[in-house]
Image (cartoon, helix red, strand yellow):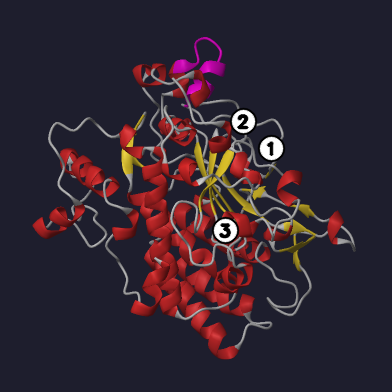
Amino acid sequence: MPSFSAEARAGDLFGHTPSVQQQHSKPAGLHPALQALQCGRLGVTFSGSGFGAAYQLGAAHMLSNLHCLTQQGMTAVLTADTPVAGTSAGGFVAAACRCSISYLDVLSALKQASSDLLQHGQARRMRSTLQPLMERILPDNAHQLCSSSTRRNAAAPSTAAAQTLTPSAAPAAPSHVHVQQSGAGAGLAQAPAGSAAAAAAAPAGTAAALSSSSADAAPPPFVLSATRVSGPCPACWRGDPVQGGFASKADLVDRLLAGAHEPLISDGRCFARRRGKLLVDGGIRLPVAPIPGVSYSLIILAMPNQLQRRLWPYRLLMHPPGPAAIAISPGQYRPWPYSSNFKQSENLVMKPKPPEVLDMLFERGRRDALAWAQHVGLDALLPAAEIQSPTAAEAVAAGGMDSNGMKTAGIEGGDNAAVWQEMRSLLATPAGQLPLMLEVPAELQHML
């Protein structure tokens, strides 16, 4: 089967912006992201984002509501079992995904923190403002969910489903990816149990063991990135990704805050000290954390791709995260007012903003995630339709769907035909016309 070009796989990660024709035309063959999704080897990486995390929350919300058919049956593109990685504020989004926290609840906490910092100032108050909000919103077992010993709801694929995948659908993990592992997180760099790659590599007689029980499956990777200070010169600093090994909820919160530590701004200290290491914001040296054991990493930025490169200089070339693509970012598939204005884009995501601006970024993230799903051809993983689906507007008018165009009844209620019909309707809706979930002031709607 023909596949997407090398640029669609990884080229734009290193700064190559696709042409308009490449952005809006759908190449022949199944996109590598969908191949990885089919066999459970799709990872999602949230880059450092500051208050632009609202954009990433919106994108994650949409991905968690886009359902398709995989080896495990009907599943969302992004679930609590999806391998995820996060840097700086992106780590908060990754933790919300792993702990199944409502993205709207996280957005509400972000708006509360932003309003507080706007009113009382950022200097030396970032950590004291964010820490109680994170402790309140994360569940008591968050450290276990982020470094658990079993993979939840990870049913092994059937033999028939495994045979439908091409060999390229589940390549081995890139040899250059090295992630620190400790405690329950050890051993996650191998292919997930039950995957096509694991089945191919297993000795004879072990196939039954791979599918015997989800309790024996490896947990999905969860990676948090920080920058380790290893000398007086920033050129000597190195990325410090860690996976698992969190002793408690407070330990997880401490790591999240250390990975987002802004020297002198967060709490007045130059560096955050954790387990004998001096750490600062992960975006300084490892803005895109590698995820072990995945065949494709879907990277979500909060700034336009071509402008984000100005924040990273040569750092991506020093720490390439393997097969990946900057798939969702402002201006990637749809116009963005600040695509060529670095100062405005940086100010929009790096400084505290009023709640209505964060609502706008959330809605923009939802729409851009939908545009990505349409571009890669997610509808190829839906069952064949025997009748023409109604438009999203018709479905909303008929009831049974919310303002997001999503099914209000439980997805697991057995009415799968209606779910697939609604997915087709949603994927047929132009991203710019997606109904809003939140109220965005008229003066900000040109950003959508």
* Residue 277 rendering spot, x and y as whole percentages: 79, 59
User: In the image, is residue 250 part of the stretch drawn in magenta?
Assistant: no
For this orientation, the residue located farthest to the top is 204
First reached walking from the N terminus: tag 3 or tag 2: 3
Q: Secondary structure at mark 2?
A: loop
Q: Which residue is mark 1?
A: 177
Q: Which residue is mark 3?
A: 91
CA neighbours of label 1 inside 10 A, class few (<14), some (14 to 19), many (20+): some
Q: Nearer the viewer, residue 254 or 312?
A: 312
For this orientation, the residue located farthest to the left is 398
* Label 2 to label 1: alpha-carbon separation: 8 Å
| CB under 8 Å between discs 1 and 3 | no
Q: Nearer the viewer, residue 208 or 284?
A: 284
The reply, left or right, for residue 308 in relation to residue 119 is right
Number of numbered discs visible in the structure rendering: 3
The circle on residue 173 is 2
